């Protein structure tokens, strides 16, 4: 962990070992150039605590890019609660409340929200200890689920990608593979089905995929066949690192456009896909719908206004794709330069 921290480009890591549940808690604050750090809280089992720390760091960096890409005055941060086993009931509540107190002690330097392994209800528990939590509407006492907002961003981003790859935004006649039937995967699958695409679903919990497939008239593929399944659009909506030197040569898609954070195992994977003629929608741009919704809804903006803002991702991604095509490069690089411009301009100011 010492090496990880010494080599990280970020600003700070807050660490706590929660003895009661044997959970390592990490809050990674990557870059506060644009504002205080905000990002989701992930509850996950990792092989070692260092893997949890590494994930928190990479995810926090992704949030720095996400906020810059969508023009919010917030910085990159993320928290990981690396649990030794699934926690439920009082044990989970206790951990979340102690985490809430840790967040409270930072006085706003880090604000959290839901992510993989946490729900808006979990945010309500954290909210018993701190005001610096999103995904829960205190005034109306209701959870605010970012999933459908993220899904809308992915959907309009797919339109931009379809236009770029096939010359039409039409979903009819296209096959879309959704990996991960969760908070984003479910509403995304519905939208894609409604738009007339042929839908293929996959989840590590195969029954989950089967149930939704039956409801939507879709088919399923086992989780270990995702990379090889032929499709027009592959939408990773689960864990990260799924685009790597092993999977990319196998991919049977023309477009990768999904909601997972940190889809690339390493930056070189963007070039690997580019060389194979696969159009990649940069994750932190296309998946920024939830990040757009949480702070805006928290400040009292109307849902319709938020949805309109998320619909602009189609234009943003269209611009990123055009620059990439003009330079014969992966859209990853075009997006990265956009982010660098925003951060550099603010550092100079
Ligand atoms: N975890 C989601 C994301 O990474 C939603 C979220 C955004 C949660 C911002 C908290 C803060 O985009």
Image (cartoon, rainbow, N blue to C red):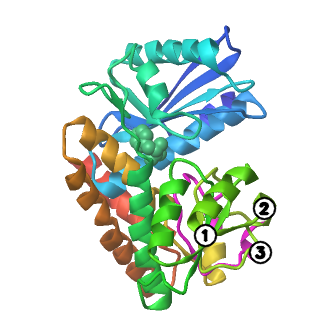
What residue does disc 1 label? 217
Give the number of the disc on residue 250: 3
Closer to the chain start, of discs 1 and 2, is 1
Between the C-alphas of marks 3 and 1, the distance is 27 Å
Is residue 92 something one can see in this rendering? yes
Left or right: 273, with 144 as reference point: right
Quarter of the figure with the N terminus: top right
Residue 263: where, in percent of width, then height? 60, 58
The chief SS type of the magenta part is loop
Between the C-alphas of marks 1 and 2, the distance is 17 Å
Residue extending farthest top? 20
Give the number of the disc on residue 222: 2
Between the C-alphas of marks 2 and 3, the distance is 16 Å
Q: Secondary structure at mark 2?
A: loop
Q: Quadrant of ligand 1?
A: top left
Instruction: Name which quarter of the figure residue 135 lies in.
Output: top left
The verdict on residue 269 being magenta is yes
């Amino acid at each position: 962990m010492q090496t990880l921290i010494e080599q990280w480009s970020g600003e700070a890591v807050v660490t706590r070992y929660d003895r009661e549940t044997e959970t390592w808690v990490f809050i990674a604050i990557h870059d506060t150039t644009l504002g205080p750090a905000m990002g989701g809280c992930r509850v996950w089992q990792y092989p070692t605590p260092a893997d949890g720390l590494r994930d928190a760091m990479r995810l926090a960096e992704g949030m720095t890019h996400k906020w810059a890409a969508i023009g919010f005055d917030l910085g990159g941060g993320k928290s990981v609660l690396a649990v030794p086993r699934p926690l439920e009931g009082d044990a989970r509540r206790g951990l979340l409340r102690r985490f809430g107190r840790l967040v409270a002690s930072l006085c706003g330097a880090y604000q959290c929200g839901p992510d993989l392994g946490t729900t808006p209800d979990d945010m309500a528990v954290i909210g018993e200890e701190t005001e610096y939590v999103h995904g829960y509407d205190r005034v109306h006492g209701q959870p605010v689920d970012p999933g459908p907002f993220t899904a809308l961003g992915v959907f309009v981003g797919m339109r931009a990608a379809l236009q770029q790859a096939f010359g039409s935004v039409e979903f009819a006649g296209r096959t879309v593979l959704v990996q991960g039937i969760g908070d984003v995967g479910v509403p995304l699958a519905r939208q894609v089905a409604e738009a007339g695409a042929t839908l293929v679903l996959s989840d590590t919990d195969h029954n989950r995929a089967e149930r939704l497939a039956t409801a939507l008239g879709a088919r399923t593929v086992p989780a270990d066949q995702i990379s090889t399944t032929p499709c027009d659009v592959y939408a990773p909506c689960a864990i990260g690192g799924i685009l790597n030197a092993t999977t990319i040569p196998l991919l049977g898609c023309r477009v990768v456009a999904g909601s997972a954070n940190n889809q690339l195992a390493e930056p070189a994977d963007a070039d690997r896909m580019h060389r194979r003629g696969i159009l990649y929608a940069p994750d932190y741009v296309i998946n920024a719908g939830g990040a757009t919704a949480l702070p805006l809804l928290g400040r009292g903006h109307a849902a319709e206004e938020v949805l309109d803002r998320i619909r602009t991702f189609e234009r943003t991604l269209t611009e990123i794709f055009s620059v990439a095509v003009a330079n014969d490069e992966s859209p990853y690089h075009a997006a990265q330069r956009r982010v660098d411009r925003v951060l550099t301009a603010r550092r100079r100011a």
